[in-house]
Image (cartoon, rainbow, N blue to C red):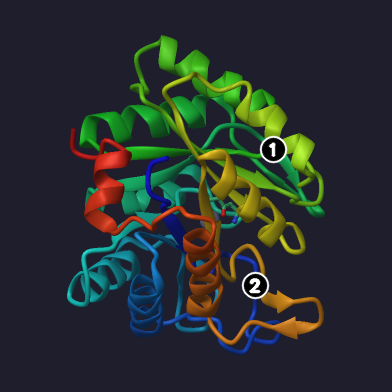
């Protein structure tokens, strides 16, 4: 089995310091957390920026600072969010693409997102895909529901996404697909054979889905964006603590953990 790619989703757009005191928010905090996660075994960092008040922002300037701070520390793959927060406009969301990152997220459909709606019309998806293709940015296709796989495949038929496609199954968002193991098997069974996939289990689903992904040949995303606990009732001390646990489990299960250069090869980044 190929080595395991661990993505650290450090901050997200929804979690607050009140909920998780160790949440990294400033560019320096985010870059330091990325470096700690890199040392713990992460090869991709999924980044959401915050402004000086701690509110989610898609400002290119903040993303630029974060990118540069991370690059000065290590060669982890920088993957900014184009999802942002549910209230960000399309134009706000696309800003980090102007930095030509190696990778970026591409949400492949609209979903209920707790009490909100996370809007991803066909027009949005196509525009994001088109810009990423022009800029040679590897999209990570965010799948919140089964139909989102087909949305991505339709766009691939139009030539806007290239194979092999890399999917991220975001599972357990209230309002979207749950995070049971049969849900994961169902999603995995509907992607093209040469695809790669990772799983981001939300809250209590994070660990069980991660362990199954390790065994099934998928990859794993963990971090405060998805889950703030180490175990039930106990907050995690840092994002790196969550990464470190996944790396340990993977090695225990006989699967080595990829470094950033190996992850680039597995994901066909730049190829
Ligand atoms: N914050 C969510 C509404 C992404 O990063 O691309 C969207 C999100 C997806 O987190
Ligand atoms: Zn995100």
Image quarter of residue 55: bottom right
Locate residue 206, reporting x and y percent.
67, 59
Residue closest to the eye, 139 or 63: 139
Secondary element type, mark 2: loop
Residue for badge 1: 184
Tag 1, which secondary structure? helix
Question: 139 above or below 19?
Answer: above
Viewer can see residue 145: no
Query: In this image, 220 relative to 163: left or right?
Result: right
The residue to which callout 2 is attached is 15
Q: Is residue 5 left or right of residue 187?
A: left
Quadrant location of residue 134? top left
Position of the N terminus by quadrant:
top left
227 lies above or below 36? above
**Residue 81 to residue 185: above or below:** below
Query: Which residue is painted at 59% across and 25% down in the image?
Result: 149
> Residue 204: which disc?
none
Q: Where is residue 22? Give x, y as percent.
A: 56, 87
N-terminal label among 2 and 1: 2
Q: Quadrant of the C terminus?
A: top left
Q: Is residue 183 above or below residue 146?
A: below
Is the residue indicated by label 1 positioned so its CB lies within 8 Å of ligand 1? Answer: no
Q: Mark 2 and mark 1: span between their CA atoms?
A: 25 Å
């Amino acid at each position: 089995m190929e080595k395991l790619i661990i993505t650290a989703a450090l901050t997200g757009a929804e979690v607050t310091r009140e909920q998780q005191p160790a949440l990294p928010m400033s560019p320096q905090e985010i870059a330091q957390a990325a470096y700690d996660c890199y040392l713990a075994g992460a090869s991709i960092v999924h980044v959401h920026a915050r402004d000086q008040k701690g509110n989610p922002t898609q400002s290119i300037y903040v993303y630029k600072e974060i990118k540069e701070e991370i690059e000065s520390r290590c060669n982890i793959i920088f993957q900014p969010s184009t999802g942002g927060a549910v209230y960000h406009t399309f134009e706000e969301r696309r800003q980090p693409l102007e930095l030509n990152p190696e990778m970026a997220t591409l949400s492949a459909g609209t979903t209920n997102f707790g009490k909100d709606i996370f809007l991803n019309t066909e027009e949005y998806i196509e525009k994001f895909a088109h810009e990423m293709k022009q800029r040679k940015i590897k999209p990570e296709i965010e799948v919140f529901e089964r139909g989102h796989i087909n949305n991505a495949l339709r766009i691939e038929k139009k030539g806007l996404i290239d194979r092999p496609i890399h999917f991220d199954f975001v599972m357990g968002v209230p309002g979207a697909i749950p995070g049971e193991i049969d849900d994961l098997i169902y999603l995995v069974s509907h992607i093209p054979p040469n695809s790669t996939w990772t799983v981001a289990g939300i809250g209590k689903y994070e660990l069980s889905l991660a362990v199954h992904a390790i065994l099934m040949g998928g990859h794993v995303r963990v971090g405060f964006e998805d889950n703030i606990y180490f175990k039930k009732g106990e907050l995690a001390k840092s994002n790196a603590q969550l990464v470190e646990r996944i790396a340990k489990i993977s090695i225990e299960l006989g699967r080595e953990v990829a470094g950033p250069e190996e992850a680039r090869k597995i994901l066909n980044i730049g190829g």
